[in-house]
């Protein structure tokens, strides 16, 4: 081993040009006389130089992506200004709309409350308990493929769904998916595993923010294409979701059926949208490609009623993050003009399966 | 006269990875390239991809300290972006009508060198993937995140920088075997 160390030390000094004149002469003589050594030495030098220039390029690329993201925010501000200028003309309409909104939400509240008394309905969380299921053939194939990269050794206990907050590895899922986990891995659409750690949680809202540990991780070549809705959407808004109730991504669509969720929870929406175990943490997206909520659970009594925590709660949790884990949500929506199929195609890169391991 | 002097300085700052320089170059020339690519059948994300690739090519060229641009930075980036976009169109066979027969394939050699370098880095990435943890993180910490051996020793839980260094050499030895193994197979 010590000879290995020596050759690397020498190669490093050679690349950094810190060798003294005499040492350089000695090295040249040895390279000329010992061809086996010369070959090995050149491989070492080549390795060090390649790693150095690769490192610089990776840094530069992420700098460019960062600059690109920062500059794209500028036009967004301009449109915001224009919008405010128009406001006075629409005062009356806005007032009427607000009145209706208050009326609807109050009546929904009353409805949900009333319902609640009648049925002590159960709320089932949508994480998938894998012990119940025999693992499918596909799962096995994925596991074998992933072994080369990172191999989770224990067996998966729960799976859920997560989706990207930033391209460099911040993602969100449900708190109940990650609760009590020994370790968490995400699996992307290519079937690759990456280890992730919990950065922040809000058990009340049932949200957990995770970060992929691998430093060069990117969901895709492009920035996250969707934005996060900061206000609540109205009743009847058409929405869709994509999640991993199985090993293949699954698409479902529906609409907002109530502005408040289970037991009148104002942080949630009630949706008429089919969801299955494993879809916990999946994004709920409106027609324009804004994330409006995150799926958390469903009613066990009726099929097709799903609850989702609104993205407002997520935005609040992100605002409360410590300064060192600064996380900038995407500001530009690139899905707006696209057809549903195209939106889904783009979204697949940013949605992943969450695998939770417990002893 | 005035222009070329400051452009050379800007280029050297860009080569050193200075953010302000990269920002200046980026914002100065990005709109023109985007407009051109959009006119030639591309989307805005396409333009961002192509333009960033062109900037990486310039960045790599400028790593050579003797490198002197024979034209303005903007001209170079625009020409390389055009060429890259034509290549992409040609590959996808979407808009054959737009492709020039000759003449507009500027800086062909630079792009060829760039593609070779990317292939080389691809093999290196593959070898790093196979290397596994903690070696991959350790090597990235040193070569990519510019961490000192002291910081690495602290981050990875080695008792002192020398131990971390020994570990780094072990990782490098394994990486070298993997890398030249990968190359032999390809």
Image (tube, coloured by chain):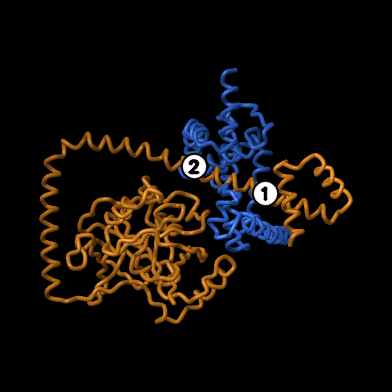
Residue nearest the observer in this picture, A145 or A45: A45
Say which of marks 1 and 2 sits in front.
1
Q: Residues within 10 Å of mark 1 (few under 14, many from 20)?
A: some
Q: x, y (%) of residue B37? A: 50, 38
Q: Is residue A65 left or right of residue A310?
A: right
Which quarter of the figure has residue A177? bottom left
Q: Are marks 1 and 2 on the same chain?
A: no
Q: At which x and y percent is residue A53?
A: 64, 45
| Residue placed furthest toward the right | A33
Label disc, if present, on residue A50 of the rendered structure: 1
At 11% from the left and 41% from the top, the residue drawn is A92
| Disc on res. A63 | none
- Residue sitting at x 32%, y 62%: A207
Q: Is residue B95 left or right of residue A223?
A: right
Image position of A303 with respect to A293: above or below: below
How far apart are the two marked residues, 1 and 2, measured between alpha carbons? 26 Å
- In the foreground, A303 or A81: A81
Visual hue assigned to chain B? blue
Residue A76 is at least partly visible in this image = yes
- Residue B71 is drawn in which quadrant? top right
Would you say residue B93 is visible in this rendering? no
Name the chain letter of the residue that bears numbered label 2: B
Against A174, is A317 above or below?
above
The image shows residue A215, relative to residue B78, as above or below, that is below
Label 1 is found on which chain of the structure?
A
Image point (32%, 55%), residue name: A291
Label 1, secondary structure: give it: helix
Asked if the residues shown at circle 1 and circle 2 are in contact, with their CB atoms under 8 angstroms apart, the answer is: no
Pick the front one: A138 or B7: B7
Q: What shade does chain A have?
A: orange
Q: Identify the residue under disc 2.
A: B48
């Amino acid at each position: 081993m010590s000879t290995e160390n020596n050759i690397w030390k020498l190669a490093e000094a050679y690349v950094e040009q810190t060798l003294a004149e005499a040492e350089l002469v000695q090295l040249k003589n040895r390279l000329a006389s010992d061809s086996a050594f010369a070959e090995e030495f050149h491989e070492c030098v080549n390795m060090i130089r390649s790693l150095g220039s690769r490192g610089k390029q990776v840094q530069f690329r992420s700098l460019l992506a960062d600059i690109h993201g920062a500059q794209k925010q500028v036009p967004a501000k301009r449109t915001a200004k224009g919008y405010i200028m128009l406001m006075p003309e629409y005062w009356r309409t806005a007032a009427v709309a607000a009145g209706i909104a208050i009326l609807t939400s109050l009546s929904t509240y009353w409805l949900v409350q009333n319902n609640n008394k009648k049925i002590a309905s159960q709320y089932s969380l949508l994480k998938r308990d894998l012990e119940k299921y025999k693992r499918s053939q596909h799962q096995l194939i994925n596991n074998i493929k992933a072994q080369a990269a990172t191999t989770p050794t224990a067996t998966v206990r729960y799976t859920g769904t997560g989706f990207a907050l930033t391209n460099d590895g911040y993602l969100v899922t449900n708190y109940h998916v990650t609760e009590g986990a020994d370790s968490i891995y995400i699996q992307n659409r290519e079937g690759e595993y990456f280890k992730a750690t919990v950065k922040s949680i809000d058990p009340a809202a049932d949200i957990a923010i995770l970060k992929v540990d691998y430093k060069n991780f990117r969901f895709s070549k492009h920035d996250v294409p969707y934005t996060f809705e900061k206000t609540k959407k109205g009743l009847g808004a058409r929405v869709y979701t994509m999640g991993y109730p199985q090993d293949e991504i699954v698409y479902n669509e529906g609409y907002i059926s109530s502005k408040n969720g289970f037991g009148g929870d104002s942080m949630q929406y009630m949706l008429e949208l089919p969801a299955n175990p494993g879809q916990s943490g999946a994004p709920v997206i409106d027609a324009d490609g804004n994330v409006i909520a995150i799926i958390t659970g469903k009613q066990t009594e009726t099929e097709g009623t799903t609850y989702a925590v609104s993205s407002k709660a997520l935005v609040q949790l992100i605002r409360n993050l410590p300064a060192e884990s600064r996380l900038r949500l995407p500001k530009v929506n690139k899905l707006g003009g696209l057809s549903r199929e195209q939106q889904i195609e783009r979204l697949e890169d940013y949605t992943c399966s969450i695998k939770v391991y417990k002893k | 006269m005035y222009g070329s002097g400051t452009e050379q300085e800007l280029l050297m700052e860009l080569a050193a990875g200075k953010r302000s320089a990269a920002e200046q170059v980026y914002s100065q020339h990005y709109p023109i390239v985007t407009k051109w690519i959009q006119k030639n059948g591309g989307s805005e994300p396409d333009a961002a991809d192509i333009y960033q690739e062109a900037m990486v090519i310039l960045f790599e060229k400028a790593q050579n300290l003797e490198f002197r641009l024979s034209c303005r930075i903007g001209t170079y980036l625009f020409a390389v972006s055009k060429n890259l976009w034509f290549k992409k169109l040609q590959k996808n066979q979407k808009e054959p009508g737009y492709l020039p027969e000759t003449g507009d394939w500027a800086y062909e050699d630079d792009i060829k060198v760039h593609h070779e370098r990317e292939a080389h880095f691809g093999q290196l990435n593959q070898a790093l993937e196979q290397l596994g943890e903690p070696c991959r993180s350790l090597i990235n910490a040193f070569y990519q995140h510019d961490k000192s051996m002291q910081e690495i020793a602290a981050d990875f839980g080695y008792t002192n920088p020398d131990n971390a260094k020994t570990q780094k050499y072990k990782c490098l030895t394994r990486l070298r075997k993997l890398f030249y193994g990968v190359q032999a197979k390809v």
